[in-house]
Image (tube, helix red, strand yellow):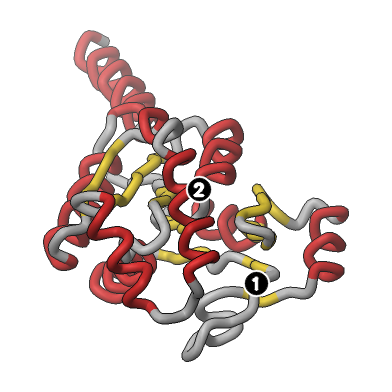
Amino acid sequence: MERKGVLIVISGFSGVGKGTAVRKLVDKYKYSLSVSATTRAPRPGEVDGVDYHFKTVGEFRNLIDYNGFIEWAQYVENYYGTPRKFVEDELAKGNHVILEIEVQGAMHIKEQYPDAVLIFITAPDAHTMKQRLEGRGTEDTKAISKRLKRAYEETDDMPQYDYLVVNDDLDVCVEDIHSVIQAESFRASKHEDYINNMKQELYDIRKEILS
């Protein structure tokens, strides 16, 4: 039975380790990962085209004008967007596609793709999240404060997600997300072609027996 590709949208608070979880998920289970575009500066060790497509503000706005993004949003003074072509090509091949995007973008994706599965990753508690942000060592106190403020605002959007996964243990978190994706791929609503073919085949066989 051929399965249609599932579009998985993964969001989460800053500092919860969603990027690490997504990379491990893709490495282990070979899901297709859509690489987002952003205008923020690369962090140490990040590679253009692998972690993000790093763009200038001008380049990003040009892509907006040419409808090059499925969604885009501004988050903590930077732009983030999901390139359209890669996602649509992979889904057409029947591959599961993961998008790691912010809350604003996730809501836009759901409007365009009602069957998309929205997963929100969180830390066990707020204190752990603060410690993880500080532990990255990439931002000053002011920037961390902005991210915590944004996280507070994002709690209003959490109920709009289909699943909530706590990243307390990375390996457990990855397996929890994988289980969600596998379950979603078996939804009857994603197999309309199979259902219609089965119905037609049963009709033809019964007609043949009765003739």
| x 26%, y 21%: residue | 202
Residue at numbered disc 1: 40
Residue found at the far top of this picture = 210
Q: Quadrant of the C terminus?
A: top left
Q: In this rendered view, identify the residue nearer to me: 89 or 158.
A: 158
Tell which tag, 2 or 1, sits nearer the viewer. Answer: 2
Percent coordinates x, y for residue 172 in the rendering: 12, 60
Q: Which mark is residue 172?
A: none
- Whether residue 37 sits left or right of residue 45 in the image: it is right
Q: Quadrant of the N terminus?
A: top left
- Whether residue 99 sits left or right of residue 200 in the image: it is right
Q: Is residue 181 visible?
A: yes
Asked which quadrant contains residue 119, the reply is top left
Q: Would you call the spot at circle 1 few (<14 residues within 10 Å), some (14-19), or many (20 or more)?
A: some
What whole-number distance in Å separates the C-alpha atoms at marks 2 and 1?
A: 17 Å
Say whether disc 2 or disc 1 marks the residue closer to the N-terminus: 1
Q: Is residue 93 visible?
A: no
Residue at numbered disc 2: 150
Percent coordinates x, y for residue 142 in the rendering: 53, 65
Asked which quadrant contains residue 196, the reply is top left
Q: In this rendered view, identify the residue nearer to me: 100 or 134.
A: 134
Q: In this rendered view, identify the residue nearer to me: 95 or 120.
A: 120
Which three-letter amino acid code belongs to the residue tagged 1? Arg
Q: In this rendered view, identify the residue nearer to me: 110 or 72.
A: 72
| x 40%, y 45%: residue | 4
Which three-letter amino acid code belongs to the residue tagged 2? Arg
Compared to residue 56, the image places residue 156 above or below, namely above
Compared to residue 211, the image places residue 154 above or below, namely below
Q: Do callouts 2 and 1 mark residues in contact (Cβ within 8 Å)?
A: no
Under tag 2, what secondary structure? helix
